[in-house]
Amino acid sequence: MSQTIAPRVRTLLLLLLAVTGALLAGSAPVSAHAALTASDPQQGSVVKEAPAQVSLTFSEGVAMSDGSVRVLDPKGKRVDTGKTSEQGTNTYSVKLHSGLPDGTFTVTYQVVSADSHPVSGAFTFSIGAPSTTSVSVSDQEAGGGVVGGLYGFARYLSYAGFILLVGGAAFVLACWQRGTGERSVQRLVVSGWLALTGATLAMLLLRGSYTGSGKVGDIFDLALLSDVLQTKTGAALVSRLLLLAAGALFIAVLFGAYEKREDDEEKGDLTFGLAIGGFVVAAGLAATWAMAEHASTGIQTGISMPVDVLHLLAVAVWLGGLSTLLVALYRAPSIEPAAVRRFSRIAFGSVAVLAATGIYQSWRQLGSWSAFTGTSYGQLLLVKIGLVVVLVGIAWISRRWTTRLSQAPATKAVKGAKTSAATPVKATAKTSAKASAKTSAAASAKASAKASAATSERSEDEDRETEDEKESAAAPAGGGDGKRATQLARQRAAVATARDKRLRDADPLRSGLRRSVLAEAGVAVVLLAVTTVLTSTEPGRTVEEAEAATAASSQEATGALAVDIPFDTGGKDGKGLARVEIDPARVGGNDMHVYVQRPNGKAFDIPEVKVSFTLKAKDIGPLPVVPDRIATGHWTASGVQIPMAGNWAIAVTVRTSDIDQVTVDKNAQIG
């Protein structure tokens, strides 16, 4: 078992990189929390006179600077003043120059939503009559590209670092205080601190380019960094760095002064102080996520942010403790069954907290059962729930191994190994070598008696080690007795380490626990990757509210109905949005326009679109409509008959290639 640890760790790391890469690649471009719900002039509209300004209304407040909204004439020349202003609740405008010619104008926007994610898009309107335009809108949405991928990886690394730092320290303090002296545990917690610190610094540098141009060259732009520091996200990242400085002091005390304390009362007082200080630092670190992301926007923010902090802490205690237990089982000479039992109880409590806070977060972010399957956020959440169920199932198996391990008596072989490890080194090389040879022979005999499954190869290894010790003892000690004694001590330590590993591996209970914990860690890697993508995905409640607001705004302004339906044909470049506009949206004849767009708002050139209407309550339909293509991404049909008022299901079939096709639908009130 000990010889397979390196391949298993490498496999786990490869799994981490593969899952992270796949999910981050699948998540670009990033869906944001804010959405454009209305504009004046409206998308695709034709106005008789040039407007004095262009106004944009979003589903929530956004951060907007000068130049965030640009208006381009048919030749691609800017015709806006560049100065943006807030006109009302979530409505922003930019003034236009006077004397604009007739033709089609393009409006592009790039802002940052209240939950820190970039939002970009584009639409067109015409003055007098539509015309051809030479404006080219980039297919890359804000938050995508190389910079977006780096920023997403840094987010994942920051979560992983937080889990290892907080969970590892909590495991040592609450379950296994002897672990403060284990080098492998120390390295794990320090690695978590380094990962979180490095990821936070990287996010600070990447932030300006991530929410702006998306260019790699802008990563080290000090002017952009200065702008980032003035934002809510920048303040959260700086606060995280300050808390990490306090975390470094905590680590120094935990693995330095704490380990050296021998007085039980003094050690108890220090444990209490470290627990209080560590909780404050951990809660503060968790709050830097809560104050800048999904929990800080939407409904009930006063409740959602503390709940989010509890959720993050429970994740860290569970998964971070699990990682520390895995390291201890593979690297530490021994770990007491009582420590494993204590962690099992703490992990159970963490799962209970996760369940309670997760249910509240799901309700808050989804808002309806339909959002579970009808939005990307809901679908990702279902995957996360499934992974948690699998993880809890494996944890139940680990709990059974823990019970068996705690009920089994300690083997004499392990006791003999501990005695051997505790024996002080004698002054002379000759005496030390003899003592080591006797101890090795006794331990080998006891291990053979206990481990009935030991192979002949292992016996040969033990004989070889014994012969090595005898040869070392027989070697003459000349003038360099001190150097020779040091060399022999290193040899004995290596032999003792190899022997201890064999003794641990001979215990089937410990081996079973290690296998189940390793499986838990593998699922946890995937779960963390899904969670990272979930935090950068637009919540289902926001998606549905934005769509409802868009339809209501459009119908209120023109009497028409506008319905946005996302689609994904599954092929390469198959994602987009179908916008169906019905005018005047009442019983009888209607004009219908279908706009097919890419995720960034640019017109999507596809070969075929079909639409059908179904009134399920009256068992009417589907009533098929085949619109005519009049421009790139624009399809229309006249005289579309709606026989009666009701909640109609509007189904749109989109074909993006010869083989890639999908039908998506949404309900809307007509008449």
Image (cartoon, grey):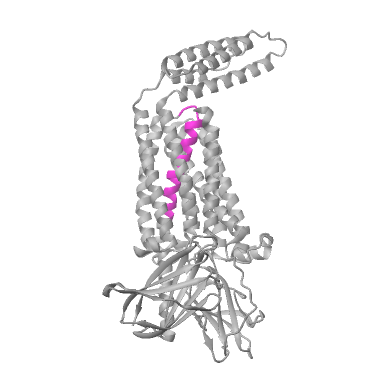
Q: Position of residue 607 (x, y in %)?
A: 52, 70
Q: Position of residue 22 (x, y in %)?
A: 53, 52
Q: Position of residue 669 (x, y in %)?
A: 34, 78
Instruction: Give the dominant element type of the magenta stretch: helix, strand or loop.
Output: helix
Q: Residue furthest right?
A: 479
Quick one: 145 or 57, which is closer to the camera? 145
Q: Is-magenta flag for residue 173?
A: no
Residue 510 visible within the image: yes
Q: Which of the 4 quarters of the picture holds residue 478?
A: top right
Residue 59 visible within the image: no
Q: Residue furthest front?
A: 658
Quick one: 151 or 312, which is closer to the camera? 151
556 displayed left or right of 619 = right
> Is residue 661 shown above or below 628?
above
Q: Position of residue 194 (x, y in %)?
A: 58, 46
210 displayed left or right of 557 = right
Instruction: Report the span colored magenta.
Output: 308-334
Q: Is-magenta flag for residue 310?
A: yes
